[in-house]
Image: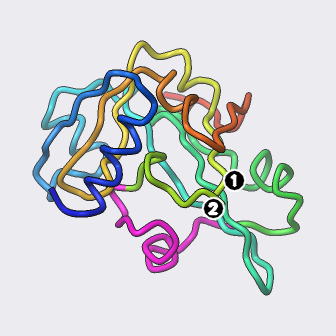
Amino acid sequence: MNPIEQLVVDAAASTGAAFDVIECDPDLADTAAFCEAYGIDPADSANTILIATKEDVPRHVACVVLATHRLDVNGMVRRRLGARKVSFAPADATGDLTGMIMGGVTPFGLPANLPVWVDAAVMARPSVVVGGGSRAMKLRCPPSTLAALNGVEIVDDLARAIEG
């Protein structure tokens, strides 16, 4: 286990809740490929997406949404941040801020000063699979584990179900 994966596992363990580590092929870490290859229902897969304000000194928030939902970036997220403009944080900024790479970002082990918003729909699932800090690992846990992390806020309508 590399240092970021150990940090993630330690953060998950600190909640006192049960969780499973799922090792995966890094080439299959992206949500659709992972779900298909490992037999995971996309409705039980949650992505952690870093959003940045478009300001001289950007502010960031990590948003956790189900793979079957689309984050309301320019509506709910922008309003909650009180910003005129927001966007998905670029991969290099995500790595610099979290120590994690795209395809592995997780709410576990994030910096204490980074707010984490979890869409309320995530909390309705019996369990969810989230990133593990790298593209080679995921965690499966009850959503209550996410809510037990410091700095997490459950947000209604943070994302909308994708039609179709």
In this rendering, the answer to whether 141 lies above or below 77 is above
Instruction: Name the spot of residue 48 as percent of width and height, x first.
Output: 48, 48
Residue 84 is left or right of residue 56, and the answer is right
Q: Secondary structure at mark 2?
A: strand
Q: Which mark is residue 51?
A: 2
Residue 105: image quadrant is: bottom left
Residue 163 is left or right of residue 159, and the answer is left
Q: Earlier in the sequence, mark 2 or mark 1?
A: 2
Q: Which mark is residue 45?
A: none
Q: CA distance from mark 2 to mark 1?
A: 8 Å
Residue 115 is left or right of residue 13, and the answer is right
Task: Tell me the kind of residue under disc 1.
Answer: Val
Which residues are drawn in magenta? 87-104
- How many neighbours does mark 1 have within 10 angstroms: few (below 14), some (14-19), or many (20 or more)? some
Task: Tell me the kind of residue under disc 2.
Answer: Ile
Which residue lies at the image location 17% right of the left edge and 51% below the top edge?
Answer: 28
Query: Label 1 belongs to which residue?
Result: 73
- How many neighbours does mark 2 have within 10 angstroms: few (below 14), some (14-19), or many (20 or more)? many
- Number of marks drawn: 2
Which residue lies at the image location 67% right of the left edge and 52% below the top edge?
Answer: 115
In this rendering, the answer to whether 144 lies above or below 134 is above
Q: Choose between 110 and 43: the one closer to the eye.
A: 110
Residue 91 is left or right of residue 78, and the answer is left
Q: Are marks 2 and 1 in contact (CB under 8 Å)?
A: yes
Residue 40: image quadrant is: top left
Quadrant assignment for the N terminus: bottom left
